Image (cartoon, grey):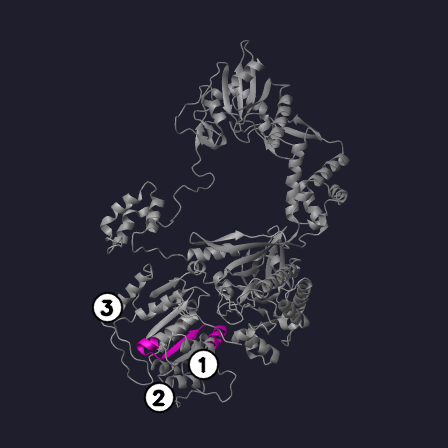
Amino acid sequence: MAGFTYEKNLPHQERAIESVLSVFNHIHPPKQNSRDENPEIMFSGSLKMDNLQKIQKANSVEDIPLSGSNVLDIAMETGTGKTYTYTKTMFELNRVLGVFKFIVVVPTLSIKAGTKNFLQSTSLAEHFRQDFAGLYGEKEIQLYVVESQKNKTNKSSMPSEIVRFVETEDTQKIHVLLINMGMVNSPTMAGKDKNNDGSHLIKDQYHVPFEALAAVKPFLIMDEPHKFPKEKKTWENLLKFNAQFVLRYGATFNNQFENLLYRLTAIDAFNDDLVKGIRAFTEQIDGDNGERIKLIDLDGKEATFILNKQEFKLSKGENLSRIHHAIDDLFVAEMNKSTLVLSNGLEMKKGESLNPYSYSDSVRDKMMRQAVRQHFELEKQLLTRNGGRIKPLTLFFIDDIQGYRDEKNQLSGSLKTVFEQMVKTELENVLKNESDEFLRQYWQTALNDISQTHGGYFSRDNSDKDEKIEQQVNEILHDKEALLSLANPRRFIFSKWTLREGWDNPNVFQICKLRSSGSETSKLQEVGRGLRLPVNEYMARVKDHAFFLNYFVDSSETDFVKTLTDEVNNAVIKPIVFTELNDELIEKIQAAYPNETKKNIRNTLADLTDDDDVFLENGFAETKKRFPKAFEVSGSLKKDKIIRSGDRAEKVKMRVGKYDELKALWEAINQKALLQYKIKDEAAFLALLTQYLRDNAHKFTKTGIRTVQQEIQVSNGLLTAVNSESVYDEVFEPINTLNYREFLLKLSQTALIQMKTLHQAFFAVRDVLDISKYLNEQTIKAIQAGFDRWLLLHSFSAFEVGYSRVGGSIHPTKFTDSQGNPLSEIKASDLGNKTQIDDFKDPLAEFLFESVFYDSELERENITDNRIQEVIVFTKIPKNSIKIPLAGGKIYSPDFAYIVKTALGETLNLILESKNVSGSDDLRQEEQQRIKHAERLFAEINRDVNVKFQTQFEGEQIVEFLRAMM
């Protein structure tokens, strides 16, 4: 197979390379002291700082302060070719400055393996020899890889690769020493290896590798700089290389920049189609009541968990399935008094919780099946396209190595068995209707030996000598070309987080996290394993299509999409720096100042630009001062925009003496009343419940796993998520959260219905509702709320209701204290949420309160307009003060109370419900039923007190009701 085909001069990579080279503009000619050393780079005066400032301005990264140190930072998002970029930078530094010795430091062995494979590849060497018109001549990389000597016999005190690297004088090659973090921190590098007695000297001077390497005046290149924080030991050791310059390349710097030269953000990468888009498949548990297993105590021997108020004590080796039935194969592996480690590597501290459904084999199997099905859909699309076939790969992250390999590291186990059966089933299905001859042969080859379709890489594989495993590891880590060969049936890769950072393959189109990783990591780092644009069968990058990475997560990461988009969007700190007054800048100003015309803006800024509209020195900075709103960054929330309930609660004063005239009516309508359901017997109630279930059988939530699919895209410079669904997708798989008896008991206690009646009702409707599929907390809540509403809507038709009043004290009330004395003031919010600000009117003299608070315009008119001579006093009834019980369990409170004196001296009491709609036909059915209940109650009260209940609609006047009553 031909090697990878590399593209030269990609703009985003060239800008990064040019930024590094520009640091050395106008320097003195480099000084070469010894043939085995790099030339020494010298700056005069402020030249280095001047160059750094110019580079930052050109790349619009002036927002990051410069330190002036020898550390140069290049921020490039995952998947955009950092390794290629720093490799070409080495060629350019060699060509321009004569630098020929570089040290490349990487954090992990998997990154080291990938970097080694890249730098040693024949295709890369040919690319630099043939694709640049002789610019680099016959120059090529000579790689020296520093390996651990743990397992080697006849260990040398000085690694031979370091000796060769330090002593070489061959300036016709670019010499690169590759070393990982673990080796940097080893005793060997510090010269403290037990075999190092000081007798073996490099260049007859150095017995400490750090000192020998420092002597060659190297350039140090650091990959993934966030793995090398300055407060840690590794950074201290890296300084011992005494590098002339340290070039740090990474997507993540945790805002710990030194001298940032160039920044390619995730938004840039997505906007410029430099990486795949992301399509997230999130498993959600329908019927999950949100229950979580919480670790509440650790004593070093036992861990105490709590679930639904019940405590469970587990010792080392005990399975969490004791706590929740949904958990499979998750046990306590280690613990001390502060930390517990589960068998999947998850660390828990006191107070932390986990979702039990994330550890269900049902969820795992659903995710695997979904990923396998999507994979073969991808193969159909990508292997039949014009312009070269693309072989897709799917990466599975697992926590159960034993489920994939046994203790002897042989391929076996429950997960492997289930997975292979899924692949077999899916291959048989897709072959039934496939007519493309290549696909049929490709799929049939896979079906003939399913075991060849997948492979794994785990940390323990580094020391394993099994031939099959060595082949898998070699393909996954070292030989991407072999893995991507269409002659190779392997397309599924399993790993336990080992490949989560640093490793990538351009043709990873799916990542499936079968279990939570057990540690918090950047979501962008996780998806980065598959962001790189793919290559076709000729190893050429394909960028003429909008490719997507499918990412599968379980219900413990339902916020995955939000977390990822927030992470990306929060990193967008790069301000836009305009060099000229163009249409884009004018539109930006007009968006903040809509009354400004283009002509006015140009006139205002005329003294800041030249004849070609290019800003003069400090012109753009002055523009920001003249139109500051156009460049504002969202800041903190203004004071009082969000306040807690009860903050600044306003009071409204009661008019002295007015309550006495209202007292009799107020006490009469505040007397407690009981609602009576006039249902003959339990059999009649059963008939009502059965009818409700038949009417609403389609509304319940099945208990199971549902896949939510979202596509992440760029909109207005930020990442956003868009839901994506298909009527053909399998979106649901059953899973149990309660057994039938638990379900009946909880429903009985919640809805206050006998278990026997519930069972009889479910049995009666079994033809339309199989309740066994809905055994979950959400169904319980739905039946409670739904049946209550059904009772309200069907009262007076399916059954009758009545009221009986109960004696006893009614005070305190919203108007009175416990002794029945009127309050001086009450909370204004009890009367209404609105008050008059403009066109202020005092309330009518007969109104009980001094101020106007209301909820609708009709209420305001009643309070401030249309005075009626016969009304002695009237009031807005405080919310929930008169609690009229309704069928279904809720309560209701009318709006107004009026006291009227007739011409004959009689007192007439009116209770009013005001509705700001044109008539009863516009009322919701629930409102109509509430009013019917109020009418029924006040008819009962009217036996003792002369009181009438009326409903007022828009356009109706109070005086009309009073005339009719008199």
Helix, strand or loop at mark 1:
loop
Q: Is residue 425 visible?
A: yes
Q: Is residue 500 above or below residue 654?
A: below
Question: Total marks drawn?
Answer: 3
User: Could you tell me residue 697's position as x and y percent?
Assistant: 69, 43
Type of amino acid under label 3: Ser
Q: Nearer the viewer, residue 773 or 344?
A: 773
Give the residues in magenta.
93-117
**Image quarter of the C terminus:** top right
From the viewer's perspective, tell me whether residue 384 is left or right of residue 590: right
Read off the residue under disc 2.
203
Q: Earlier in the sequence, mark 2 or mark 1?
A: 1
Q: Are marks 2 and 1 in contact (CB under 8 Å)?
A: no
Type of amino acid under label 1: Val
Residue at image point 44% right, 39% down? 647
Read off the residue under disc 1.
146
Membership of 104 in magenta stretch: yes
Pointer 2: residues within 10 angstroms few (<14), some, or many (20+)? few
Type of amino acid under label 2: Lys
User: Could you tell me residue 286's position as x and y percent?
Assistant: 62, 51
Read off the residue under disc 3.
46
Which of the 4 image quarters holds residue 424?
bottom right
Q: Is residue 697 above or below residue 12?
A: above
Q: Determine the CA span between mark 2 and mark 3.
A: 36 Å
Helix, strand or loop at mark 2:
loop
